Image: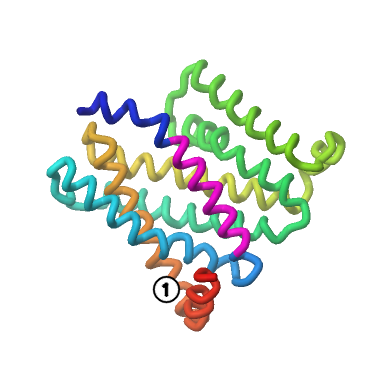
Amino acid sequence: MHESVEDLWIPIVLVSAALQTARNAGQKHLSTQVSPWLAAWVRFGFGLPIALIYLVIVLAGFDLPFPPLTGKFLVPALVAALMQIAGTVFLIRLFRLRNFAIGSTFVRTEAIIAAVLGSVVFSESIDLWGWLAIVISVTGVVLISVVRSTVRRTSLLGSIFNASAGVGLLAGFGFALASFFIRQASLSFADDNFVYTAAVTFIVVIGLQTLVLGLFIGFFDAGLFGIGWGVSGE
């Protein structure tokens, strides 16, 4: 069973990439009409029912119960939720900046940031081939971003101190921390069924994001929810 599940990683990655592209396009449209905080909440809040359906399917498919949630799981899950909220808000903020192409290039350094943080700060071991794969993948994505944009080489080299680059790096840093703590939360179950642990982690993290960000928005301006509902339905 596990071998057949592991064979699904290629189509899962392809579908995820396509859905992520569509999601970012929707967020970019939404960011022109509402605040970054509300646009981020729409991402999490509207995704919660889908995550719940997915969890029910996984639990039924493996005939497993929902596991007890301990502090060892909840702490990294909460940190991951907060870091992903921050990364999402910075990404949405980036949509409004002039040099979006440059900023989005720096967002894609998430993988290398996660690797460095995991290795240096959290003592995660990565072999030479792992580092090489990370560098190649990040380089490829950056080159694709540059080729598809109107950015010249000189402007790219001079964009390190650009506001878009800074926001892009902050977004990438947030996403990198989120991915690391999501992994830590999932591994805390000590279960080799990664589909099961990932589904549980997914629903808890997105639930925390919806709750925390919802409370934040509700405290400052609850009327934004009505605006977000109307705009997202356009």
Residue span colored magenta? 13-29
Q: Residue at x 36, y 48 (%)?
A: 76
Residue underneath mark 1: 215
Q: Single out the residue that lies furthest toward the front.
A: 234
Q: Quadrant of residue 37?
A: bottom right
Q: Nearer the viewer, residue 128 or 124?
A: 128
Q: Nearer the viewer, residue 126 or 12?
A: 12
Relative to 71, say whether 229 is above or below. Answer: below
Neighbours of disc 1 within 10 Å: few (<14), some (14-19), many (20+): few
Q: Position of residue 53 (x, y in %)?
A: 28, 55
Relative to 139, say whether 228 is above or below. Answer: below
Task: Give the overall secondary structure of the magenta segment.
Answer: helix
Residue 128 placement, left or right of 197 = right
Q: Nearer the viewer, residue 98 or 169?
A: 98
Q: Position of residue 216 (x, y in %)?
A: 47, 72
Q: Is residue 178 magenta?
A: no
Which kind of residue does numbered mark 1 sit on? Leu
Q: Residue at x 38, y 31 (%)?
A: 9
Q: Position of residue 22 (x, y in %)?
A: 54, 51
| Element assignment for label 1 | helix
Q: Single out the residue that lies furthest toward the top.
A: 128
Q: Residue at x 43, y 40 (%)?
A: 180
Q: Nearer the viewer, residue 28 or 220?
A: 28
Q: Residue at x 45, y 40 (%)?
A: 15
Q: Position of residue 206 (x, y in %)?
A: 38, 57
Relative to 210, say whether 170 is above or below. Answer: above
Residue 212 placement, left or right of 27 = left
